[in-house]
Amino acid sequence: MIDTEPTIESDYVSEEPLKLASGENLPQIVQHYAVYGELNDDKSNAVLVFHALSGSARIADWWSGIIGEGKSLDTSKNAFICINYIGSCYGSTGACSVNPKTGEIFGAEFPLITVSDILKAQKKVLEHLGIEKLKAVIGSSVGGMCALQFAVDFPDSVEKCLVIGTSELSAMGLALNHLQRESLKLENNVGLARQIAMISYKSPELFNRRFGRNPNRSGENPRLKFENRFDIAGYLDYQGEIFKNRFDAETFKIISKAMDLFELSDLEIQAIKANIYLVGISSDWLFPAADVKKFAERLNEKGVNAEYINFESPDGHDAFLSDTNKMSEIIKRIQI
Amino acid sequence: MIDTEPTIESDYVSEEPLKLASGENLPQIVQHYAVYGELNDDKSNAVLVFHALSGSARIADWWSGIIGEGKSLDTSKNAFICINYIGSCYGSTGACSVNPKTGEIFGAEFPLITVSDILKAQKKVLEHLGIEKLKAVIGSSVGGMCALQFAVDFPDSVEKCLVIGTSELSAMGLALNHLQRESLKLENNVGLARQIAMISYKSPELFNRRFGRNPNRSGENPRLKFENRFDIAGYLDYQGEIFKNRFDAETFKIISKAMDLFELSDLEIQAIKANIYLVGISSDWLFPAADVKKFAERLNEKGVNAEYINFESPDGHDAFLSDTNKMSEIIKRIQI
């Protein structure tokens, strides 16, 4: 499976502290990144991909149907770079790292991070790699927020910006993130927080089709005992359980908070020079397609070249991961 | 406010044990009930109202705009009876009661309860009051399940059945109930469970209109500190907090589980003789209007006289409580 291994996987360490939007400084930072495909000599074929809340820099680990030779993110043509967010737990400086100031793990002491902070750090990696201008930035969910904010913060550094299932969070989106952080407070319960997140990533239609009112596939009968579950409950418990082993509570809080704070002012929007492609997923209720469309209209009104693209899928927010064929079609349409 | 006080508020104690669907017996049971208006001599003006998950027998405490003299549930014409569910914590035998077998509080030992069990107990109160046939049964949410199941279990005892924002729970509905019960497991967290419930009772549209992306009205700035909240989060926290003081974790679990189990077989549906009115709330995502409509169609196919009524409201599931004018119109249309 050489196709799914990055060409480069490495850490970049910046010695100078990173000044955050909150005013705090993050001392010496490590950023873990991966590159798929080969950067050409003039570094003009670089595409920056942003991961979602629980993702890592290893794009092919979570987007295997999308990235590779001849696929819609074609590694024989472009070099795709993904950098684990500061604040995350997949190799970059985050809540699990040692705070050089104190010699202890950051934990809940990790400072408040915004999407702009993440990008400010990532720009240093791009500079280190000698990349001045990106062909494109691509992301979904919090990754979509990063893509948009990149076009705002570094307007001369990107040509195309593909944003999937993303807008500013609505009040319901803020509510869902709040519930997740509240459950993380209780015995740091990553499992329950993940379960709440999962219902927002999937559509009612998908749940009905896949689980309906069936008893849990383990064979337990929900009518017989209080603890016995329906299939959907067994599925959510399982999702919570496996997530506990791969994710960290503080990271969850940090990135979810960064999502909450993503918001573009009119002035910021007017700074954008890239062509923006905003994809709304028809069955997404975390970032409803109507909100994405309205966001595209707002960009247009402010003079940005933004196109709204409808992604018709019954899979909910996670369609960008699960509905590979349609996702590929849309990416190909952008012509990166 | 004499209008909001019941004519009768009392307890009915049945000495013989109640045999539950699970096979277990519930010993001597108390049921707390309230009557609004006067029962006429031949007891032909009785209407049974069912409360929702967190409601009590005191209808006017939660449906004040609906019940009273000259209102849509007109106490000058009919007698409206509401009986607190067994398993609940508002006066009837429930998890907070002493188990006469052990002399200790039931707590988590309270047996599994179905909607039919609740009705079997309530029928005893009706008999005690000398009521053989009800003009109508009315309920929303789990109360709607009770109304429907009443028409199944006692087909000769009711003429009209008004069911608001109710169907069998979909997989998403089961998921939401599961999340609530999961959070109740953690330090018995009634507050978080209520917060999860609240998002399912309200619509995204209502949340946007009422809270949007505003900072919490307390004045805290979400950008400044990790703990600082948006207005929607402050609202949810507050809802969770006040609920803790009025509701019990075990009751929450018991009634939520009874909701999960509500399901009508074709045979059960064919037993119905009452006229059924099924109301779908346009912005309800816990019991989507489309599901209610489909349920009405299923009843029709099985020969039941069922009418689907559209309740156009932006308020979500809770519209039956908040959108008094439209709720009143619909109730009046049924002509009880």
Image (cartoon, coloured by chain):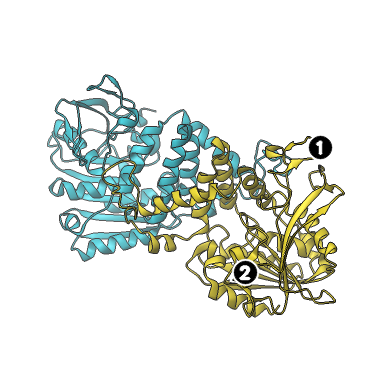
Chain colours: A cyan, B yellow
Please state if A151 lies on the left or on the right of B190 as rendered.
left
Residue type, numbered disc 1 = Lys
Quarter location, residue A185 = top left
- Contact, CB < 8 Å: mark 2 with mark 1? no
Dot 2 lies on which element? helix
Q: Nearer the viewer, residue A70 or B207?
A: B207
Residue nearest the viewer, comparing A97 with B84: B84
- Residue shown at the point (24%, 25%) measured from the top left: A11
Q: Quadrant of residue A85?
A: top left
Q: Position of residue B238 (x, y in %)?
A: 45, 51
Q: Amino acid at mark 2?
A: Thr
The percent coordinates of residue A103 (x first, y second) are: 27, 19
Find residue B129 and report its horizontal and vertical position in percent.
Answer: 82, 65
Q: Which chain does the numbered disc 1 sit on? A: B
- What residue is pinned by disc 1? B101
Quadrant assignment for the N terminus of chain B: bottom right
Q: Residue furthest top?
A: A103
Closest to the camera, between mark 2 and mark 1, is 2
Reply above or below: B75 against A101. below
Dot 2 corresponds to which residue?
B4
Quadrant including the C terminus of chain B? bottom right
When the figure is inspected, residue A98 is found, relative to residue B48, above or below; the finding is above
Work out whether disc 2 and disc 1 sit on a shared chain.
Answer: yes
Identity of the residue drawn at 62% across and 50% down: A212
The chain to which mark 2 is attached is B
Sequence-wise, the earlier of marks 2 and 1 is 2
Name which residue lies at 19% across and 34% down. Answer: A39
